[in-house]
Every structure is written in structure tokens, then in C-alpha cells.
Amino acid sequence: MNKLCNRDELTALRHACAGALQLETKRILVCAGTGCVSSGSMKIFERLKTLLEGKNIPVSVELVHEPHGESVGLKECGCHGFCEMGPLVRIEPQGWLYTKTRLEDCEEIVERTILGGERIERLMFQKDGAVYPKQDEIPFYQKQTRVVLEHCGQIDATSIREYLGFGGYSAFETALFDRTPDDIIDEITKSNLRGRGGGGFPAGRKWAQVRRQTEPVKYVVCNGDEGDPGAFMDRSVMEGDPHRMLEGMMIAGLACGAAEGYIYVRAEYPLAVKRLRRAIAQAEELGLLGEHILGTDFNFMLHIARGAGAFVCGEGSALTASIEGKRGMPRVKPPRTVEHGLFDKPTVLNNVETFANVPLIINRGADWYRSIGPENSPGTKAFALTGNIVNTGLIEVPMGTTLREVIFDIGGGVRDGKAFKAVQIGGPSGGCLTSEDLDLPLDFDSLKKAGAMIGSGGLVVMDEDTCMVEVARFFMHFTQNESCGKCVPCREGTKRMLAILERIVEGKGEEGDIELLLELADTITATALCGLGKSAASPVVSTIRSFRDEYEAHIREKRCPAGSCQKLKRIWIDPALCKGCSKCAKSCPVNAISGQIKQPFSIDLSKCIRCESCISTCAFHAIREG
Amino acid sequence: MQPTFDYSAVDDILSLYGKKESNIIAILQDVQERYHYLPREVFPYLSGALGVSEARLYSVATFYENFSLEAKGRFVIRVCDGTACHVRKSIPILERLRKELGLSEANKTTADRGFTVETVSCLGACGLAPVITVNDQVYPAMTPDKASELITALRAQLAAESEGASA
Amino acid sequence: MEQRAFTTVDGIPVEINGEKNLLELIRKAGIKLPTFCYHSELSVYGACRMCMVETERGGLEAACSTPPKSGMVIKTNTERLRRYRKNILELLLANHCRDCTTCGNNGKCKLQDLAMRFNIEGVRFPNTAPQQQKDESSLCIARDSAKCILCGDCVRMCNEVQAVGAIDFAHRGSKMEISTAFCVPIAESPCVGCGQCAAVCPTGAIVVRDNANRVWRALDDRGVKVTAQIAPAVRVALGRELGLREGENSMGKIVAALHRMGFDEVYDTSTGADLTVLEESEELLAHLESGSDLPLFTSCCPAWVQFCEKTFPQLLPHVSTCRSPMEMFAAVIKEQEKTSSRTQFHVAVMPCTAKKFEAARDEFCVNGVPNVDAVITTQELIRMIKESGVVFEDLEPEALDMPFGVTSGAGVIFGVTGGVTEAVLRRLASDKSRGGLYASALTGVRGMKGVKEASVPYLDREVRIAIVSGLANADALVRKIIAGEAHYDFVEVMACPGGCVSGAGQPYSSSAAKAERGEGLYAVDRVSSVKRSEENSLVQALYGDVLKGRVHELLHVDYVKDGGHNA
């Protein structure tokens, strides 16, 4: 493909691509997100291709914009979000969604759906006896507002032409030809777009600060180091709609006067790296990246830096250090990243979702953007819904949607009919919210007030069987393991907090432990060097606040109310049922069971290792847990 | 005498990235991709080429979880212990894998270099929790029993490979 | 007129006068803010979090990394701050080996000092740190990770100021440690023994190796004749810890103290320096004449020589073949006393840790016996004096012994950066008047700057001179020279910033104090009757006597041949 030399050529290509899309009268979109790929979606893709070709049906796997006849489009698309039901296959123009598709279903899909235009109800989402043929009608999608993720699942994630056909790079075009850098920044500022990476700092203000710097060399950096366990929003955008993010970064470069950008992607996302590399190569080929873009004086290059496994690199200064080839240790501020960022130059650093919002704002305007969500946190937010929830997956809702709507309406409530206990929001830096908080609107300020944070948007739902002390221990273990080790409070403090939590879940907690945890938490929060350190203790503080009684039960009664802490399990013999056969005593590997034949036996808890081997040997079901 | 180390692969990587300090991580990643770990011989060589002290290279290599200074197994099994996988019981899977292979937290690779078992904080495939990966291929919705089956299958593959190699 | 700006520190308005951070400003206000990781000569690291201060609105800022602003109101000592500082100290102590009384840094440890200041009464956490082997592979420094608080001062010193890169952080989080590459013993790393890491280490994690016991043993042995040479920089750095003023010349008292402790004869290394001046001047002239192997680098500093051997071996032909003043002098003394009936034990008191390594080099051994039997640093001497019970400040000064107790001012200024060059310039100058002396001093050789340049006419040409101190400065300069971007005839290199007065064997002090020590040496020069090395009558006599026909054997060394392989 030739380089586009001016605006007209870009417009023409976009028209051609849109026209070519029209010729794909039927489209099969196979989800090629990490989730569905691991459930075998690529095999389904190949099978469909072979079947269609075998029947001499014209298939277009790649969008070509030269004139040609009608065809069936068969595309690898981005994550639909409904990972639980994968592999997912979307059928257009009907908008049907086939779930849990198997290889054996392919023949039928081609025969009945593509050739016959019929729907296969068996493959459609069903709930309470009702069949939901259309994707939009499925409760999981109904309450969502997918704008940032609008393309995910709808377009070929590997094709710049398809992105163009859907109107791609028009925001960049507008920004480049019809707006001044100040116009762009004004629009972003007016939209009140707040950084989606956690802090919620207004993007427009950040951009303006970078623009003001007199240093001629500046950088745009995209934080794709989505390290929060239980979060995969950014991954979906990078994999499913990489060009939108690129476009956002290009607009940022234009607005701030940067000619180079870096995308920092965590190493655990090989598919995202692949898709982004391809997207960059495509944009370079078309001359949308490079020098004298579309015949103007604007130059912009993008590079990918792969992370190497360090959660702390999600912190701005650690991330730039990592791109520079150093240990990812945060540095003291000031100077801030906007003044001295990457390679010591002024740097715009935003996360994936933030950049992906930018083309929308330029295209549809700040007023449109502010019409979604509350005044102070406008727009939508993507959340990863995971844990003990019926519908796990990726969702996008207007800011300010309540937790209840997200968990119960979209998420379908707690799995296996269990009771809702809490939801951890914001990952290891966030806090947990309980049933009392269910009507809390999800936005930056409300969550902060509630002692949690939106973070990057991971929502992990926990049911009644989840021990909150164990959850706190889990997060502390994570944070401790990921602490860079630079500042004393985080390095030493989290280690000590973890040791205390480990003692508590093992039944060795002592009176005063809760107070000591809170004291350490206070010191760490107040004195740690970076944002991650300052928030390291949040899961502990918030679980103590909401579930202090669980801590106390562990410490004082050596009991885990949720019954999940292995070391606190009590195994006992019901004397009413025990026949005194001694079978259990023989099965015990540590000789903890004793008694006289034909008399009820008993277990010495000081010896018992809770291996449970006695339970299965008892023919009379006399051995109980709890 | 130790056989002399062949640096031509390292030279290729260096020429791909350029001898710039800022490319240390990318260079180490490619070296690791080539050798499946970071051989010690590479450090003085890179130190000379990049003008960076060996201690600094070692410091970077030990900071990031993904770099390994020890040779890994043919199959690298990574058990996700992200929040979503954790609450859906990933630890029993890890324990089963370790038991099957006779490994522990300290001892991650089998003596025959067949398997390495590690944990990873999140693979971002939370919708399919709990997941594990084997050499970057994702296995969704795992259970301890499925893990055992997987090990059996991989062992068979390993045996077939070594037979093929000796034949 | 520029408006004056003030920050209010604990209710007192303190004027901002270019202080880069609040910590400096607070110090100016007379408050000793606790910190482990702040050093004005190193980059700001901000990791210990001890220097946090409270702002008016109750926010906390690390003073080391916050620039002072006009109108800022801060408090340095509040209930919260005290609580946090105590907690941080407790956390550090929890992992720390707490055998204070037997620690090499006992009494000088910042952790010990702050634990005392903040009245830490107990540690609520068990010490779970894994047992670690001490690294005593180096002759210069010893490392004990159990005492490391990971402030990173040594890493920044080794990399930023010295460009040696022997150590760095390894691993992360609670597994983080300071390490050589692959944890090899420090002696097998690029370490050059400059000891600056030990100088900035707030605890006993890196200490200078102590050889005092060997000296005591020799002193106790009646069959052994113990002689000593005292390096120039020692006399201006030792006094402060023993009741004198920083920079005050205490040579007379040192001689007296050593006599009291049982040393048979006490000499001044500046005599050796005079020999060096004469030899190095000759060498420079030869190089200038032939035009080959220029620039000529000095070789007085053993850390620099080793740095050269390890980093720039191709440069060794450019390094002066002159032995260091210590080694020249020791060779002469040992040679002269060869026929004595008593066993000779020669002690060098040095501001330097690398000298311990230099003394052990094969090149400076005769039949396997080193010419310098023991090198002790200024700090070790201070301890020995304290141990002996001699009340230093009450001592009456005594004179050097004979036959070698004759010195010149030129030899004394070797202890400060630029001193070697100035001494050589005095030798080379055709103008031997007092005016000529002043002229040499005014060429730009003086001052504590890390890189200095001078240009002096010699016969029909200009001799271009560079003077660098701090190995990072040397490294940068050498790279420029190799790249052909800089051209010099003579380059003086001292590994420690500011020269030997800042040696790692000296008591640790601020840069201002180091400058005072330098001034102290110039003051000694001013009152010395002999200003030029060639006018030292003893040195003149030596050439006609012990050195006759043996100048090369006793005063020179071939580093190229050995290539540092015995390092």
C-alpha cells in the first residue's frame, strides 16, 4: 500500500474501506481475545474458513478496498468481554452472538446461519428459559454503554483498513488539519477526561503542562502495564482495537509537541504486543506514523517497550525508568513526569483507556462526553468483573453506575447462589466494599470517599465463603512481593504486615495484632515514596474497617468464620455417630486420633494437621469439619 | 575447559537494538528468548558492548521477575495467582503441580530440566479463572485433576521427544 | 533588587539562598534533620523517609527532595513525625544485626545514633534476615550485609562519583541487597579499593579493613624496629576527633603520639613525595621531548592505577612509572636499614584505603616481604591513639626523626587535588623566585573542583595540564582523550574527590571540612622553609647515596608488564 501523502488521500482510502465493508454482506466475527483464543477460538476460525472455502463461498479474511464482489467477512475480532461464555462468534448483520461455540458447531453455522440465514438457538445465550439471540439484548450487555470498547468484538482487530472503514483516524485528521494544539487541549480539558489509570488526574491539565515546557524534545508514553491482578481492560483495548489507542497517542503528540511515543506493555500480554506491533507497522506503511505525516510538518514515531515482570512499573517514574533500561524503581518527586519524565524530557503519561477515549472526544465533542456520567467524573469506565460472579468478563458502563447494577444486573450476581460478601476494587491498592456500599456510584470521588479507589478498574467479587483476613493476606503478599524495595516503609513495613497476617490466618494471632497492623499501615501510607507504597496497606485497612470481627475471631477464638483458612479448620468426631471402629485412627498420619474400641474416638487438635484423610475413611460420616 | 561461548546470537541481538543503554531490557529479553535463560557468559560481553557495568546488568536482570539466571525446563508452567484465579482456588492447582513434579517454592525446575513451575501475579485471563500457561499457551478453567492429566500428557510428549532425539 | 524569599521552619523564617532542597535549608536553621540517604555530593535518592517534614496543611514531604518555596511553612518535629520516624527506625533495626559493641562502626553509626536520639526502647518484630557471609576478600574494605539498611549511598558513590560500578542493587523488595555482579567477592569485582563506599556507609555494612592489631603486635615485639611514615593529608584530618580544629596541622602531636606508643622512628611521606616530584618531572620532560605516550598520567593514587588496569589497560603505557610517594619512601627506608640487626617493620599512616592494596602488590615486595608492612588509615590511627590512652590534645609537638625527617612544602601539598601538579610545576619553573612560586599556585591548579585545567609555558611550548579528582571525572576525561576530543600533556588523577584529604581512610566529613583540610596543607606549605622538592637536602643526598645507580629499581615500577594481574 502506498503512503498517504495528504488529507484527500486519507479521506479517499477511508471511503474505499467503508465501501469494501458494505460488500461484506455477511460477517462472522470470531473472538480472538486471549480468553477465547485459549478456549480454542482460532481453531474455530480456521475451520470456518476451510468450510466456507470448500463451499466456494467468497470469503474475505482481510478487508481489501479494491473493487470486488460481495463476500462473507470472516474476522479475528477483539474481546467481546463475555469471556465466561467463550469462544464467542458474532454473526452480522443480524447481531447474533453464539456462545461456547465448539469445533463441531462450525458446519452447522455455515450451513444454517450463513447460507440459510437461520439462527441456531442452542448456541445462543439462554437464561431462565429465555433465549437471547442478539448480543445487545443479553442482560450482560444491556446495561452497558460501550463507547471505548465499541469496536471490540465488532471489527477486525488486525486490520487498519477495517478501522478506517469504521471511521478510524478521523479524529486525528481533524486534529491535524482543523485544530491547533491549544484547541485540542481545550477540548480535552473541557471534556474533563480524567486519567483512567488510577489517580484520576485530568488529562487536559497534564497535556497543557507538558505543552508549556520549553524543552523541544518531549514524549508521549502509554502505560499498558496493567499489573493489577484481576484487571484486563487495557489488554482488551490493546488486543481488540489497537488503532484507537494509537490514534489517541498521536493526537496527544500533536497537542503537546512530541514527536516520539512509547507504549509500555507488560510481558504477560504477548498477544497485545503482537497486535500493537502490527498496528504500528500498518500505520507506518500508510504514512500515518513517520515523518511529514499526511504532507504536514508533524512527525510522530511509536515504539513498544515490553515490561519484564514488575508490578511497580505501573507507577509513572518506575515505568519511564524501565523504558530507559533501568530497574523500575520510582523516584522522588518533584520534578514531576510532565517536567522531567522519560529520558529526563517532558512527558505525557496516560494509560491505555485514557488514550482510547481521546478520538471519541475529538470526534463527538466535549459536550457529548460530559453528557455521560456524573459532572466530576464524566465518561464511561471499563471494569473487569471477576471472582465469584456469574458473568465474569469485561464491561463498560457510564461512570456513576452503582455497584449493585454492575454486580447484579450485568454480572448476574454471585455464583452458585451464594451470598454476596464484598467486592475488592482497585486491586492491591484499593479497598473492599461491602453490601452496605452496593448503592455507591462508581466514580473517582465517591470511591475515594468510601476508602477505595477506582484504580484501573478491577472488580473482584467475593462470596460468603471468602475469608477477608485471607484476602488481606493475599493482597499484602502480592504487594510485598512486588515492592521495589527502595523506601524503608514499603520494603520493611509490608514485610512485617504480611508476617502478622500470616500468623493470624494460621491461628497464631495475638492480642494487639490489629492495632500493630493499623499502626504500620499508618506509617506506610504517610511516608512511602510512591503511590503504590502509599496505598499498599489499603486492603488491610479496609478489611479491618469492615470485617474487624473476622480478624478478632481468628485472633481470639482461632476460628475462621468463613471456614476457609486451612490451618484453622477443626475436625471433630461426633460421639453420637462414632461406633469406635478405630478405622480413622489407623488412617491418621500423625496419630492424632485415639480412643477405645467401641467407644467414641476423639481427635487431638494440637496434633491434627487437617489433612482430612480420616473423614473419607469413616463409614458412619461421624467425622465433621467446622 | 569450558567450551567457549558462541556470541554470534548475542551479536545479532545487539545489532538489532543498537548498543544503547536504554535497550538493556529488550536485549536481555531477546537473549532470554534465545537461551530460555540469561547465561552468565553473556554479562561481561554485554557489559563491554554497552558500556554498562556488569553489576548494573545483574541489578536489572534480578529486578524483573521474568528474567531467569538459571536454565528453565522444557515446559514452563506458570500458575496464575491473580486475585480472580486466587479466589477461584488456584493454590490447590499449584500444589498439585508441585506434588506431581516433586517441586517446591524454592526448587522450581525438575532435575531433568523437563518442567519449571512458577506463579505469575495475573495473566489477564481472569474470565477463565483459574488459568495456567504452558510455554505461553493458556489453559483455562483448571482444576487439580486437570493439572495432573496435563502433566501426564506433557510427560508423554517429553518422552516422545527424547526418543526422537536419540533415534 | 531581587526580593528575598523565606521559608518558615518551626516558626523561624529562614532565608532561601539557593538551597536545592528543604533539608539543606533546615540544616541552615540549625536543625539536624535525621537522614540516612542524603548526601549533598550524591543524587537525591529519597528512600529512607526519615527527613519527612509536615507542611502547614498537614501534608508530609521528604525534605531531601522538596525545593524550598517562598512562604512555605513547615514543621520538623511533630508528634506524627516522631511516631513515623520511630517506626521506620524500628523497622530498620528489626532486620539489623544489633551487635553494636563489637561493630567496626560502633560510635560512628548513624542507625545507632538515631536509635539513641529517638529513644527506641524495643523492637516488636523478630529478625528474619537470612544469615549471610561477610565479604572479607578485599584488603581495603569489608562488607557485612547483615548491617546494610539499603540506603544506596554506596551504590551511588561507586557509580555516580567513582564510575567504578563494582556494586549495585540486586533483586527487589524485601529480597533486595547490595551486590556485585553474581555476588562474586568484592575483590574479584571491578572494585579499586577507593573505599568511598565505606566513607558514606551510615552503618557498619561496609567498613575499612583494620590492620591496627598487626601494628600493635610489631610494637610489642622488642626484636622489631618499627618505623612509620605519615601521609600529608593525615595531619589535617586527624585532629578534630581528638579535640583539635578541622584542618589544623597536628603533625607534631602525631609524631609525639607515635613515639609514646612505641614507634622507633617517625617520618613524613612528603619526603617520598619530593622524590616523586623529581622523578616524575624527569619523566614528563622525557615524554615531552620524544612526544610519545602523551599525556602522562600520574601514578600516586593506587585506586586510579587499579582503575586504569581494570578499565583502560591500553592506557597503562601513559601512566607514570614512578612509584607512589609511600612506596618510593618505603623502598628507600627499607634499603637503608637493610643491614640493621633488628627486623624492620614499616608502617604507613594513610588517608587512603587503596594503599592497603598497593602495599601488598608484588611489585612492592622484596623477597616476598612488602616494603610497607602495614598500612593504617587516619581512622585506625585515631583509634590506636585512643586505645593507648594518650591524651592527644595535651601532647607537646615533637620533631620528625633522623635520618629521613627532612621535608619540603611541595611534598606536603600532595595531599590535596592539584598538589602533585603544583609541586611538579615548581620543579619545572625556570623562575625560582617567590614570584615563581605564586605563579605556579595561580595557574588554576588549586581548589576543590573535580576537573581543573592549566596551561604553562615550558621552553618553547605550552604544557597542557588537566587535574581531575573523583574517578567519574577521570573516566569522562579519559574517554574524551581516547576519542581525540581532548588533548593534554600531563594529567593528575586522584580517585577521591578533592584528593587525599577526602580519602576514605579519613574521618567522614562534609565537603566544606574537606576544603578546610586542603587549606590546612597549603598553610603548612606557606610556613615551610623549603618550598621545592629539589631543594630538599636529604633528597639530594639520597641520590648520591642509596639511590646511586638504583633509581629505577627503587623508585619506579612497571605496571604494564604486570597488567594488574595480581589484583
Image (cartoon, rainbow, N blue to C red):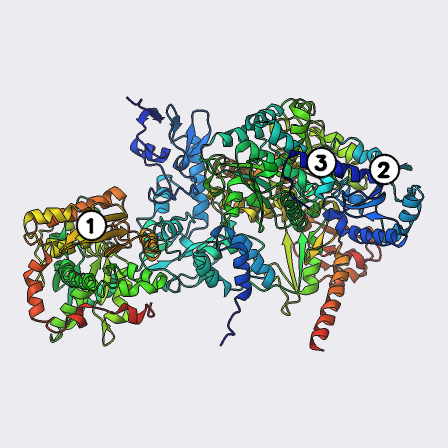
**Residue A574 appears anywhere in the view:** no
Where residue A248 sits in the image (x, y, percent)?
62, 35
- Mark seen at residue A12: 3
Label 1 vs label 2, nearer the camera: 1
- Residue closer to the observer: A184 or C24: A184
Q: Chain of mark 1?
A: C
Q: Chain of mark 3?
A: A
Q: Quadrant of residue C229?
A: bottom left
- Residue closer to the observer: C101 or A532: A532
Kindly identify the amino acid type of the residue bearing the numbered disc 1: Ser
Kindly identify the amino acid type of the residue bearing the numbered disc 3: Ala
> How far is disc 1 from disc 2 in space, using C-alphas?
84 Å
- Residue closer to the observer: B58 or A436: B58
Q: Quadrant of residue A92?
A: top right
Helix, strand or loop at disc 3?
helix
> How far is disc 3 from disc 2 in space, using C-alphas?
25 Å
| Residue at mark 1 | C455
Where residue B45 sits in the image (x, y, percent)?
47, 63
Where residue A32 sits in the image (x, y, percent)?
75, 47
The answer to whether A256 is drawn above or below residue C137 in the figure is: above
Helix, strand or loop at disc 2?
loop
Q: Earlier in the sequence, mark 3 or mark 2?
A: 3
Viewed as shown, does residue A253 lie left or right of A464? left
- Mark seen at residue A93: 2
